[in-house]
Amino acid sequence: SYELTQPPSVSVSPGQTASITCSGDKLGDKYACWYQQKPGQSPVLVIYHDTKRPSGIPERFSGSNSGNTATLTISGTQAMDEADYYCQAWDSSTYVFGTGTKVTVL
Amino acid sequence: EVQLVESGGGLVQPGGSLRLSCTASGFTFSSYWMSWVRQAPGKGLEWVANIKEDGSEKNYVDSVKGRFTISRDNAKNSLFLQLNSLRAEDTAVYYCAKEGPDEEPIDYWGQGTLVTVSS
């Protein structure tokens, strides 16, 4: 079965840039999306179709996808961005989620 | 405003059954694929199943095939998940989720309902 691997944790200082990677075989040939989940809350879509931001998502969130790696970038990270982030792709008629990354804003 | 409200969770013994429901509002329910996604306590997200707008196509993750059944009632704006032969590893919060148009991914989630499988 298809697997998506993320680093367990990423730390970033306020105002700096956080980059979260998502690795999967030929992931660049599929669409990747990203979800943010804060403690006790449901996930929120922050990036879809590799680079698109849903309405209401701040411009500091951006995405890319090439080769075997998709990347979520948070520019000018704020304390409110502290959360778990999950990548997702569609493969063989199933959705696959990444292993998840906890972003800590120090 | 899109709203998805799940119900039906609870405590069930191993081998038992449960039926989850999700009531949708704020969008044309019959025009979208719908999914169930689960999250075990302290763990990551796992997609469980989805169903086409008219119910004619269904997909499942391997771990639930033959045990879980997804269905929908478009007249009642409702999505269902029948859980049979439950195992301890099925313990999780189950989220009802709306998929986006034109092969876009899940764009709205409910608040979830907790299923606990334990003796």
Image (cartoon, grey):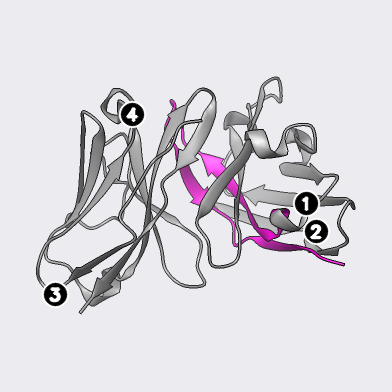
Chain identity of mark 2? B
The crowd level at tag 3 (other Cα within 10 Å; few <14, some 14-19, many 20+) is some
Q: Can residue B1 be seen at all in this image of the molecule?
A: no
**Residue on which the image places disc 3:** A13
Chain identity of mark 4? A
Tell me the distance, in whole angstroms, between the alpha carbons under discs 3 and 1.
Answer: 42 Å
**Residue on which the image places disc 4:** A25
Q: Is disc 2 in contact with disc 3, using a CB cutoff of under 8 Å? A: no
The crowd level at tag 4 (other Cα within 10 Å; few <14, some 14-19, many 20+) is few
Task: Point out the image quarter for the C terminus of chain B.
Answer: bottom right
Residue B99 covered by magenta stretch: yes
Q: Is residue B48 left or right of residue B83?
A: left
Tell me the distance, in whole angstroms, between the alpha carbons under discs 2 and 3.
Answer: 42 Å
Dot 4: element = loop
Work out whether mark 1 precedes mark 2 in sequence or the reverse, and give the earlier one.
2
* Identity of the residue drawn at 42% across and 68% down: A38
**Residue on which the image places disc 2:** B8
Dot 1: element = strand
Dot 3: element = loop
